[in-house]
Amino acid sequence: SQQGEEDPQALSIQEGENATMNCSYKTSINNLQWYRQNSGRGLVHLILIRSNEREKHSGRLRVTLDTSKKSSSLLITASRAADTASYFCATDAWSGKLIFGQGTELSVKP
Amino acid sequence: EAGVTQSPTHLIKTRGQQATLRCSPISGHTSVYWYQQALGLGLQFLLWYDEGEERNRGNFPPRFSGRQFPNYSSELNVNALELEDSALYLCASSLGTDQNTEAFFGQGTRLTVV
Protein backbone atom coordinates (compact mmCIF):
# COMPACT_ATOMS: atom_id res chain seq x y z
CA SER A 1 0.00 0.00 0.00
CA GLN A 2 1.15 3.54 -0.61
CA GLN A 3 2.56 5.40 2.37
CA GLY A 4 2.27 8.90 1.00
CA GLU A 5 -0.82 10.66 -0.14
CA GLU A 6 -0.42 13.81 -2.20
CA ASP A 7 -2.91 16.58 -2.28
CA PRO A 8 -4.19 17.91 -4.60
CA GLN A 9 -4.15 15.22 -7.29
CA ALA A 10 -4.04 17.91 -9.95
CA LEU A 11 -3.18 21.60 -9.86
CA SER A 12 -3.41 24.14 -12.64
CA ILE A 13 -1.89 27.61 -12.23
CA GLN A 14 -0.63 30.54 -14.29
CA GLU A 15 3.04 31.20 -14.87
CA GLY A 16 4.46 33.34 -12.10
CA GLU A 17 2.10 32.00 -9.43
CA ASN A 18 3.19 29.81 -6.55
CA ALA A 19 2.30 26.12 -6.42
CA THR A 20 1.85 24.24 -3.17
CA MET A 21 1.60 20.48 -2.95
CA ASN A 22 1.02 18.51 0.21
CA CYS A 23 1.97 15.02 1.25
CA SER A 24 0.75 12.98 4.20
CA TYR A 25 2.18 9.69 5.39
CA LYS A 26 1.33 7.07 7.96
CA THR A 27 4.39 5.77 9.80
CA SER A 28 7.47 7.34 11.35
CA ILE A 29 10.15 8.11 8.79
CA ASN A 30 13.87 8.57 8.42
CA ASN A 31 13.52 11.13 5.67
CA LEU A 32 11.12 12.34 3.01
CA GLN A 33 12.09 13.05 -0.58
CA TRP A 34 10.36 14.94 -3.37
CA TYR A 35 10.68 13.98 -7.02
CA ARG A 36 9.51 15.36 -10.35
CA GLN A 37 8.52 13.27 -13.35
CA ASN A 38 8.01 14.64 -16.84
CA SER A 39 5.66 12.76 -19.16
CA GLY A 40 6.29 9.20 -17.96
CA ARG A 41 10.06 9.52 -18.01
CA GLY A 42 12.48 8.97 -15.15
CA LEU A 43 12.18 10.69 -11.81
CA VAL A 44 14.30 13.70 -11.03
CA HIS A 45 15.31 14.10 -7.41
CA LEU A 46 14.36 17.53 -6.05
CA ILE A 47 15.04 17.62 -2.35
CA LEU A 48 15.51 15.41 0.71
CA ILE A 49 14.42 16.51 4.17
CA ARG A 50 15.46 14.53 7.21
CA SER A 51 13.09 13.72 10.04
CA ASN A 52 14.88 16.16 12.37
CA GLU A 53 14.56 19.03 9.89
CA ARG A 54 11.55 21.30 9.62
CA GLU A 55 12.27 23.30 6.49
CA LYS A 56 14.61 23.17 3.53
CA HIS A 57 15.18 25.38 0.52
CA SER A 58 16.63 24.72 -2.90
CA GLY A 59 16.36 27.50 -5.46
CA ARG A 60 12.66 28.16 -6.01
CA LEU A 61 11.70 25.12 -3.95
CA ARG A 62 10.74 25.18 -0.30
CA VAL A 63 9.91 22.00 1.58
CA THR A 64 8.49 21.77 5.06
CA LEU A 65 8.11 18.73 7.28
CA ASP A 66 5.82 18.34 10.27
CA THR A 67 6.49 14.96 11.83
CA SER A 68 3.81 15.49 14.48
CA LYS A 69 1.21 15.75 11.73
CA LYS A 70 3.03 13.31 9.45
CA SER A 71 2.88 15.76 6.60
CA SER A 72 5.11 17.66 4.23
CA SER A 73 4.59 20.41 1.70
CA LEU A 74 6.43 21.43 -1.44
CA LEU A 75 6.20 25.05 -2.51
CA ILE A 76 7.39 26.11 -5.97
CA THR A 77 7.63 29.88 -6.17
CA ALA A 78 7.32 31.96 -9.34
CA SER A 79 6.33 28.92 -11.38
CA ARG A 80 7.32 28.49 -15.01
CA ALA A 81 5.77 26.50 -17.84
CA ALA A 82 8.78 24.16 -17.58
CA ASP A 83 7.65 23.21 -14.07
CA THR A 84 4.72 21.34 -15.60
CA ALA A 85 5.18 17.76 -14.42
CA SER A 86 4.03 15.21 -11.87
CA TYR A 87 5.42 15.64 -8.38
CA PHE A 88 5.82 12.78 -5.94
CA CYS A 89 6.72 12.56 -2.31
CA ALA A 90 8.49 9.43 -1.11
CA THR A 91 9.15 8.34 2.44
CA ASP A 92 12.07 6.33 3.76
CA ALA A 93 11.03 4.41 6.86
CA TRP A 94 14.32 2.60 7.49
CA SER A 95 13.11 -0.35 5.44
CA GLY A 96 15.50 0.40 2.62
CA LYS A 97 12.75 1.30 0.23
CA LEU A 98 11.06 4.52 -0.71
CA ILE A 99 7.29 4.46 -0.59
CA PHE A 100 5.72 6.82 -3.09
CA GLY A 101 2.46 8.65 -3.09
CA GLN A 102 0.21 8.85 -6.13
CA GLY A 103 1.59 12.23 -7.14
CA THR A 104 0.29 15.68 -7.96
CA GLU A 105 -0.02 16.67 -11.61
CA LEU A 106 1.02 20.28 -11.93
CA SER A 107 0.14 22.26 -15.02
CA VAL A 108 1.63 25.73 -15.39
CA LYS A 109 0.02 27.75 -18.16
CA PRO A 110 2.08 30.40 -19.93
CA GLU B 1 29.48 11.91 -13.71
CA ALA B 2 27.07 9.47 -15.35
CA GLY B 3 23.68 9.00 -13.76
CA VAL B 4 21.73 5.80 -13.41
CA THR B 5 21.49 4.12 -16.79
CA GLN B 6 18.89 1.60 -17.84
CA SER B 7 18.63 -0.60 -20.89
CA PRO B 8 16.84 -1.14 -23.07
CA THR B 9 14.75 2.01 -23.29
CA HIS B 10 11.85 0.13 -24.79
CA LEU B 11 11.05 -3.56 -24.85
CA ILE B 12 8.19 -5.34 -26.55
CA LYS B 13 7.48 -8.93 -25.58
CA THR B 14 4.77 -11.46 -26.15
CA ARG B 15 2.69 -12.86 -23.32
CA GLY B 16 4.46 -15.85 -21.75
CA GLN B 17 7.94 -14.72 -22.71
CA GLN B 18 10.67 -13.56 -20.37
CA ALA B 19 12.04 -10.03 -20.12
CA THR B 20 15.41 -8.92 -18.77
CA LEU B 21 15.97 -5.31 -17.79
CA ARG B 22 19.35 -3.89 -16.83
CA CYS B 23 20.49 -1.09 -14.60
CA SER B 24 23.85 0.52 -13.92
CA PRO B 25 23.98 2.59 -10.75
CA ILE B 26 25.86 5.80 -10.18
CA SER B 27 29.52 5.12 -9.50
CA GLY B 28 30.05 4.51 -5.79
CA HIS B 29 26.44 3.57 -5.11
CA THR B 30 25.93 0.10 -3.68
CA SER B 31 22.14 0.03 -3.38
CA VAL B 32 19.86 -0.55 -6.35
CA TYR B 33 16.09 -0.37 -6.24
CA TRP B 34 13.51 -1.44 -8.81
CA TYR B 35 10.06 0.07 -9.16
CA GLN B 36 7.13 -0.60 -11.44
CA GLN B 37 4.99 2.27 -12.66
CA ALA B 38 1.90 0.95 -14.34
CA LEU B 39 -0.74 3.25 -15.72
CA GLY B 40 -2.95 4.49 -12.94
CA LEU B 41 -1.15 2.57 -10.20
CA GLY B 42 1.69 4.86 -9.19
CA LEU B 43 5.17 3.70 -8.32
CA GLN B 44 5.20 0.27 -6.74
CA PHE B 45 8.33 -0.97 -4.98
CA LEU B 46 9.66 -4.20 -6.47
CA LEU B 47 13.11 -5.06 -5.15
CA TRP B 48 16.07 -3.65 -3.26
CA TYR B 49 19.61 -4.93 -3.60
CA ASP B 50 22.60 -3.87 -1.60
CA GLU B 51 26.11 -5.30 -1.71
CA GLY B 52 24.89 -8.14 -3.90
CA GLU B 53 22.12 -9.27 -1.58
CA GLU B 54 18.37 -8.93 -1.88
CA ARG B 55 17.38 -6.80 1.14
CA ASN B 56 13.69 -6.25 0.62
CA ARG B 57 10.97 -7.25 -1.75
CA GLY B 58 7.64 -5.72 -2.64
CA ASN B 59 4.32 -7.44 -3.03
CA PHE B 60 5.00 -9.05 -6.40
CA PRO B 61 4.83 -12.70 -7.49
CA PRO B 62 8.01 -14.81 -7.64
CA ARG B 63 8.18 -14.51 -11.42
CA PHE B 64 9.64 -11.07 -10.73
CA SER B 65 13.23 -11.65 -9.72
CA GLY B 66 16.59 -10.08 -10.06
CA ARG B 67 20.16 -9.96 -8.98
CA GLN B 68 22.99 -7.58 -8.31
CA PHE B 69 26.42 -8.18 -9.73
CA PRO B 70 29.81 -7.56 -8.05
CA ASN B 71 30.07 -4.22 -9.90
CA TYR B 72 26.69 -3.27 -8.33
CA SER B 73 24.82 -3.30 -11.62
CA SER B 74 21.54 -5.13 -11.52
CA GLU B 75 19.13 -7.13 -13.62
CA LEU B 76 15.40 -7.47 -13.26
CA ASN B 77 13.87 -10.59 -14.77
CA VAL B 78 10.19 -11.04 -15.37
CA ASN B 79 9.15 -14.56 -16.34
CA ALA B 80 5.90 -15.75 -17.89
CA LEU B 81 4.95 -12.22 -18.92
CA GLU B 82 1.36 -11.15 -18.54
CA LEU B 83 -0.39 -8.25 -20.24
CA GLU B 84 -0.62 -6.48 -16.86
CA ASP B 85 3.17 -6.40 -16.63
CA SER B 86 3.19 -3.63 -19.24
CA ALA B 87 4.63 -0.67 -17.40
CA LEU B 88 7.56 1.68 -16.99
CA TYR B 89 10.23 -0.04 -14.88
CA LEU B 90 12.43 2.37 -13.01
CA CYS B 91 15.74 1.66 -11.37
CA ALA B 92 17.28 3.85 -8.68
CA SER B 93 20.56 3.82 -6.82
CA SER B 94 21.80 5.26 -3.57
CA LEU B 95 24.90 5.23 -1.44
CA GLY B 96 23.65 2.38 0.70
CA THR B 97 21.65 1.41 3.69
CA ASP B 98 23.43 3.29 6.43
CA GLN B 99 23.34 6.73 4.96
CA ASN B 100 20.51 9.20 4.88
CA THR B 101 20.98 9.99 1.22
CA GLU B 102 19.00 10.55 -1.92
CA ALA B 103 17.96 7.85 -4.37
CA PHE B 104 18.57 8.78 -8.00
CA PHE B 105 16.51 7.29 -10.79
CA GLY B 106 17.24 6.25 -14.33
CA GLN B 107 15.02 7.06 -17.30
CA GLY B 108 13.30 3.70 -17.14
CA THR B 109 12.54 0.81 -19.43
CA ARG B 110 9.10 0.81 -20.96
CA LEU B 111 7.96 -2.79 -21.22
CA THR B 112 5.02 -3.58 -23.45
CA VAL B 113 3.53 -7.04 -23.36
CA VAL B 114 1.32 -7.94 -26.33
Image: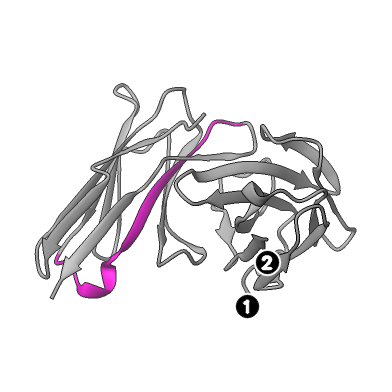
Q: x%, y% of residue A33?
A: 44, 47
Q: x%, y% of residue A74?
A: 27, 49
Q: Is residue B51 left or right of residue A92?
A: right
Tell if the residue under mark 1 belongs to the same chain as the one under mark 2: yes
SS for callout 1: loop
Q: In front here: A50 or A3?
A: A3
Do tag 1 and tag 2 residues touch (Cβ < 8 Å)? yes
Residue type of the residue flagged with mark 1: Glu
Please state the extent of the stretch shown in magenta in the rendering.
A78-94
Q: Is residue A77 left or right of residue A48?
A: left
Residue holding disc 1? B1
Q: Is residue A83 left or right of residue B43?
A: left
Which disc is residue B26 wearing?
Answer: 2
Residue A51 higher or lower than A9, as above or below: above
Residue projecting furthest to the right = B70
Which disc is residue B48 wearing?
Answer: none
Q: Badge 1 sits on which subunit?
A: B
Which comes before the other along the chain, label 1 or label 2?
Answer: 1
Residue type of the residue flagged with mark 2: Ile
Pointer 2: residues within 10 angstroms few (<14), some, or many (20+)?
Answer: many
